[in-house]
Image (cartoon, helix red, strand yellow):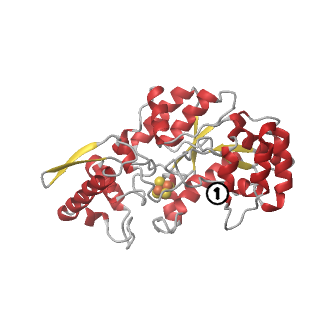
């Protein structure tokens, strides 16, 4: 299980230890050398809770931080959402090197209330499972299982492992082919509604005889898992188990034009990550001025972290005040239609993110 230093992967580590202690879990953290101190503090706290060391993976043996080492190799070309070499070089490749050819199940903390697919390795010896989701399987597997060409096999398996009194309903759903009128997502939902544990057992049986790592197991504890853990569930895992949320989530007050607002950083990852919002850059400037200065030093030879302005630009008083005012307005707008009454939920609004760095 990869620990990013964010809340969701931490919550999943807590959840798995509490619910599936029999699984011989190994934990890793891909260290870019550029994380906030709060991330390292959380990793340390989590190690105490788990009673295990979290392996620290470094992308290079250079005397420089892994990020700086690769930045040199990329001739100072800063990563961006369009050219995200950092995730590949600093996170994915070290992880896949570490595992080598060992058959592995990789646990990823995409939450039940999120509509995105997490990292799924292209290496066949690594299989990804999403325990927080209603369906824990990767999309690739789900598409194979629900494919129109394998309906007969699916029905046989449902009759074998399912509940006898639901046979007619199983057949009705399974025999209806996917089409523009009956989408994959609807079929998946209909089957899950007929029983998540049954669905899991069917998928497990379906995969037998394939090369998927899970197919090599005789049994698998998570087959009976019917949980779906959402954002509230994540916070509850922290609260119930006395683990502190990463320090950067703490709301900090600011004032602009006599109006008060609050801000925090919403994600783990490198302090200079190009995915952060403008208000988070301001947060970095005010909360970690030395790190902001270091981030600024990377902006040279025409390269900047953001497309349309440099870090020097955004800390000009007029611009900074505008960013703060925009942030206050954004919160006001969202408060009129909140998902929950916690500010942190309101801000966790599914902005474009990296499924490796911010989970
Ligand atoms: S946190 Fe951002 S900058 Fe760091 S590796 Fe991930 S995507 Fe790249």
Q: Residue at x 29, y 51 (%)?
A: 283
| 326 or 35, nearer to the observer | 326
Horizontal and vertical percent position of residue 255: 17, 50
| 186 or 17, nearer to the observer | 186
Is any atom of residue 9 visible in this view?
A: yes
Give the SS element for disc 1.
helix
Horizontal and vertical percent position of residue 142: 71, 54
Is any atom of residue 163 visible in this view?
A: no
Q: Residue at x 51, y 27 (%)?
A: 48
| 69 or 111, nearer to the observer | 111
Residue that protrudes farthest toward the left in the picture:
258
| 53 or 269, nearer to the observer | 269
CB at mark 1 closer than 8 A to ligand 1? no
- In the picture, measured across the screen, residue 275 lies left or right of residue 31, that is left
Horizontal and vertical percent position of residue 270: 44, 52
Horizontal and vertical percent position of residue 303: 39, 70
- In the picture, measured across the screen, residue 187 lies left or right of residue 245, that is right
**Quarter of the image where the N terminus is located:** top right
In this rendering, the count of numbered labels is 1
Q: Which residue is mark 1?
A: 185
Q: Is residue 246 above or below residue 281?
A: above
Q: Mark 1, residues whose alpha carbon is within 10 Å: few (<14), some, or many (≥20)?
A: few
- Location of residue 256 by image quarter: bottom left
Q: Residue at x 73, y 62 (%)?
A: 178
Q: Residue at x 43, y 59 (%)?
A: 275
């Amino acid at each position: 299980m990869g620990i990013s230093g964010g809340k969701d992967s931490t919550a999943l580590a807590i959840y798995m230890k509490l619910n599936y202690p029999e699984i011989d879990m190994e934990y890793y953290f891909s260290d870019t050398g550029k994380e906030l101190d709060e991330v390292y503090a959380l990793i340390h706290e989590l190690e105490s809770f788990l009673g295990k060391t979290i392996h620290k993976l470094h992308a290079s043996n250079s005397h420089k931080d892994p990020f700086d080492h690769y930045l040199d190799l990329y001739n100072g070309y800063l990563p961006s959402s369009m050219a995200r070499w950092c995730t590949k070089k600093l996170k994915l490749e070290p992880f896949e090197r570490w595992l080598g050819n060992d058959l592995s199940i990789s646990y990823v903390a995409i939450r039940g209330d999120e509509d995105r697919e997490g990292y799924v390795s292209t290496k066949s010896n690594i299989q990804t499972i999403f325990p927080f989701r209603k369906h824990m399987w990767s999309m690739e597997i789900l598409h194979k299982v629900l494919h129109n060409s394998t309906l007969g096999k699916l029905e046989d398996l449902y009759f074998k492992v399912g509940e006898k009194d639901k046979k007619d309903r199983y057949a009705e759903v399974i025999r209806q082919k996917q089409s523009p009128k009956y989408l994959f997502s609807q079929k998946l939902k209909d089957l899950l509604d007929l029983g998540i544990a049954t669905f899991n057992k069917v998928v497990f049986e379906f995969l037998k005889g394939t090369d998927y790592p899970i197919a090599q197991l005789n049994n698998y504890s998570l087959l009976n898992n019917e949980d779906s853990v959402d954002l509230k569930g994540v916070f509850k895992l922290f609260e119930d188990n006395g683990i502190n949320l990463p320090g950067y989530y703490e709301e900090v007050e600011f004032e602009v034009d006599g109006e008060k607002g609050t801000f925090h950083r919403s994600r783990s990852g490198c302090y200079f990550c190009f995915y952060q919002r403008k208000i988070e850059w301001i947060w970095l400037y005010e909360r970690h001025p030395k790190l902001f200065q270091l981030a600024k030093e990377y902006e040279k030879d025409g390269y900047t972290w953001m497309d349309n302005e440099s870090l020097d630009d955004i800390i000009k008083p007029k611009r900074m005040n505008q960013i703060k005012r925009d942030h206050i307005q954004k919160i006001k707008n969202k408060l009129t239609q909140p998902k929950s009454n916690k500010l942190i939920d309101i801000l966790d609004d599914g902005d474009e993110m990296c499924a490796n760095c911010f989970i």
